[in-house]
């Protein structure tokens, strides 16, 4: 006989620390799936009562009310009301509220208490409230609400035992306290009364936060600060990564020399030197730059600045028909368009969400960074253009800015044509400022490094080896004029592509690179490295020459600039297209997305090349 475990739902506003509490309660006993019929992720896990009995815990998407405005919020409402297919109604609730923001969080708590389910309130992040000079009385708040109120600090696992004990008590006893059904204004007023009643003492701790917000959210100075932070970030990508990149390149050169010296000429040596070391190694060398970029992003997120940037961008995004809520998915797309597209589930308006999905690939994902880095390193001199300002970092900043401007222009067009509709509102809670935790930053960097290296060891490795085989065979017969790159199967395929790309300044090697780059953007770099390694053959001096040096010797500046312009707009990897199909429930919009991105990339590369040639750079 199967025992049905008690089902408890974890629910609350965004930024209440709900996910941290879920992780603390469940540990490694978690699983992630999708709710039946929708693409919203279902996080579930096991916790236990004090007597050891297991409890099924589900982490519902954060929302501000039971009036849904997005797929995530719809799921939360359906689960709580027992309407979600394949999901029974919870036997109890843990309502997570931010101790330092009771005015806002208690509004939703009052709405949830009106459901009449056995409930415990987790007064989370009390340490942060105390740090800011706010002392609360959980006993008084419990008496006012009629349910247990347990102070917790989820990230430090404080209060978990008390929370589990209170939860067991209300679930086993079926203890329910039904709050009256209030309208929105009544809930707001009641929440303020409850918050005031729960405060024992309060110091003017928020003054420094208000002063910072007056600066960071200023319509003029705020934008200048945002641009300044981004500028510093891209300058650091080059200035700080130069030394570790040199170490990696030296190591690859020594490894290639060692393989050539230790192995006789043949299939296996060529595969290792030309395919693995030159191809895959040509991508791995950019790991320091990717880690530096994500170091800055993680710092901005953990300090609470990113939410301010979203509010700051709301006014600008409104001009192109989007809301500030789309800023977070677009920001996520700088790491990878896949999580960015999935993050659009929190956008209420379906046309607003669709537009954000369609422009997410225009954000410059980390996979493009190796492409940008190798071309900039080959053609843009490392000259200072001002105190602490390098030309290479300035160009990289311009490329990222071009992607953002392009995305906004496309959104402006889409919102007036194929996704025409009213602009949705924007509501987001600003988290408190805080010092970043070194452990969290290091964990984030490790995860990003692992994702990058795993791609290098799987998708990039397989694609590069396949490309090496296509470029290595059939072998050019002795005495036959021509080059191995043109004679090979891959070279012949590239010759067909070159017919289309030659008018925009692309050479034969670029035609070789752009097709496999659809598997992963970084493959464009490994493809070029592999092509030039094959052409070099057993020439040891050529084998150890960096890819940047090879490009600077063979490409014109006009071609290099056109190649950069192509990658600003070129469609994302196949995985991104597949996720877009899943999120839009069909191939119509992904096909539209790929079509317009290819058209934009072709036109941008062509215009860039023709203008550069006109100025004598060809």
Image (cartoon, grey):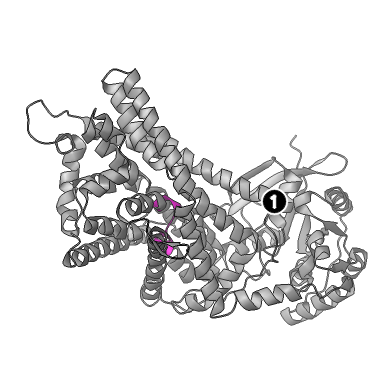
Kindly report the secondary structure that dominates the magenta region of the rendered protein. Answer: helix
The quadrant the N terminus occupies is top right
The residue beneath circle 1 is 58
Give the quadrant of residue 201. bottom right
Left or right: 179, with 403 as reference point: right
Q: Is residue 359 magenta?
A: yes
Q: Is residue 272 magenta?
A: no
Image coordinates of residue 431 in percent, x first then y, are 68, 66
Q: Residue at x 70, y 45 (%)?
A: 45
Q: Nearer the viewer, residue 157 or 132?
A: 132
Q: Residue at x 62, y 73 (%)?
A: 427
Left or right: 511, with 95 as reference point: left
Image coordinates of residue 199 in percent, x first then y, are 88, 72
- Relative to 527, is 150 above or below? below
Q: Which residues are magenta?
A: 358-368
Q: Residue at x 60, y 76 (%)?
A: 217
Left or right: 545, with 189 as reference point: left
Tell me if I can see residue 585 in this picture.
yes
Image coordinates of residue 44 in percent, x first then y, are 67, 47
Tell me if I can see residue 124 in this picture.
no
- Relative to 347, is 439 above or below? above
Q: Secondary structure at mark 1?
A: strand
- Relative to 261, is 510 above or below? below
How many other residues sit within 10 Å of disc 1, few (<14), some (14-19) or many (≥20)?
A: many
Give the quadrant of residue 447. top right
Image coordinates of residue 539 in percent, x first then y, are 23, 30
Q: Nearer the viewer, residue 199 or 44?
A: 199
The quadrant the C terminus occupies is bottom left
């Amino acid at each position: 006989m199967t025992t049905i475990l008690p089902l408890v739902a974890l629910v609350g506003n965004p930024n209440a620390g709900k996910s941290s509490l879920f992780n603390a309660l469940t540990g490694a006993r978690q699983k992630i799936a999708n709710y039946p019929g929708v693409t919203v992720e279902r996080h579930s896990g096991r916790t236990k009562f004090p007597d050891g009995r297991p409890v099924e815990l589900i982490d519902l998407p954060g929302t501000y009310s039971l009036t849904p405005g997005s797929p995530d919020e719809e799921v939360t409402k359906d689960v709580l009301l027992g309407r979600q297919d394949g999901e029974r109604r919870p036997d109890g609730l843990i309502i997570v509220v931010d101790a330092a923001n009771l005015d806002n969080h208690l509004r939703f708590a009052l709405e949830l208490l009106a459901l009449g389910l056995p409930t415990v309130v987790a007064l989370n992040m009390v340490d942060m409230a105390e740090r800011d000079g706010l002392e609360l009385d959980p006993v008084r708040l419990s008496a006012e609400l009629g349910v247990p109120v347990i102070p917790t600090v989820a990230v430090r696992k404080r209060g978990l035992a008390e929370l589990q004990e209170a939860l067991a008590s209300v679930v086993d006893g079926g203890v329910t306290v039904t709050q009256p059904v209030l309208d929105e204004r009544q809930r707001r007023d009641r929440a303020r009364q409850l918050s005031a009643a729960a405060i024992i003492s309060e110091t003017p701790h928020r003054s420094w936060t208000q002063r910072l917000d007056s600066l960071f959210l200023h319509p003029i100075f705020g934008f200048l600060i945002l641009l300044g932070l981004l500028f510093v970030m891209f300058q650091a990508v080059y200035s700080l990564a130069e030394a570790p990149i040199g170490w990696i390149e030296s190591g690859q050169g020594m490894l290639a020399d060692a393989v050539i010296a230790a192995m006789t000429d043949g299939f296996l040596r060529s595969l290792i030197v030309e395919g693995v070391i030159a191809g895959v190694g040509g991508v791995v060398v950019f790991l320091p730059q990717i880690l530096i970029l994500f170091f800055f992003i993680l710092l901005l997120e953990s300090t609470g600045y990113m939410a301010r940037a979203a509010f700051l961008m709301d006014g600008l995004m409104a001009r192109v028909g989007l809301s500030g809520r789309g800023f977070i998915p677009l920001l996520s797309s700088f790491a990878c368009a896949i999580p960015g597209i999935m993050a659009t589930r929190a956008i209420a308006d379906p046309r607003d969400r669709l537009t954000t999905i369609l422009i997410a690939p225009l954000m410059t994902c980390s996979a493009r960074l190796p492409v940008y880095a190798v071309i900039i390193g080959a053609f843009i001199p490392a000259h200072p253009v001002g105190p602490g300002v390098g030309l290479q970092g300035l160009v990289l900043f311009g490329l990222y800015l071009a992607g953002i401007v392009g995305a906004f222009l496309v959104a402006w067009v889409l919102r007036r044509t194929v996704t025409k509709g009213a602009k949705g509102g924007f509501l987001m809670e600003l988290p408190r400022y805080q010092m970043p935790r070194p452990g969290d930053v290091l964990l984030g960097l490790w995860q990003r490094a692992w994702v990058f290296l795993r791609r290098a060891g799987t998708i990039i490795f397989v694609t590069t080896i396949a490309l090496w085989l296509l470029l290595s065979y059939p072998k050019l017969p002795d005495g036959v004029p021509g080059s191995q790159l043109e004679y090979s199967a891959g070279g012949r395929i590239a010759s067909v592509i070159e017919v289309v790309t030659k008018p925009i300044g692309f050479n034969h090697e670029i035609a070789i690179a752009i097709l496999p780059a659809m598997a992963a953007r970084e493959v464009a770099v490994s493809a070029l490295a592999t092509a030039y390694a094959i052409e070099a053959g057993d020439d040891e001096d050529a084998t150890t020459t960096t890819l940047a040096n090879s490009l600077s010797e063979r490409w014109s500046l006009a071609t290099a600039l056109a190649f950069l312009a192509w990658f600003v707009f070129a469609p994302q990897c196949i995985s991104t297209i597949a996720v877009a199909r899943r999120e839009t429930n069909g191939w119509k919009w992904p096909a539209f997305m790929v079509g317009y991105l290819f058209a934009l990339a072709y036109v941008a590369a062509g215009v860039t090349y023709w203008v550069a040639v006109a100025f004598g750079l060809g």
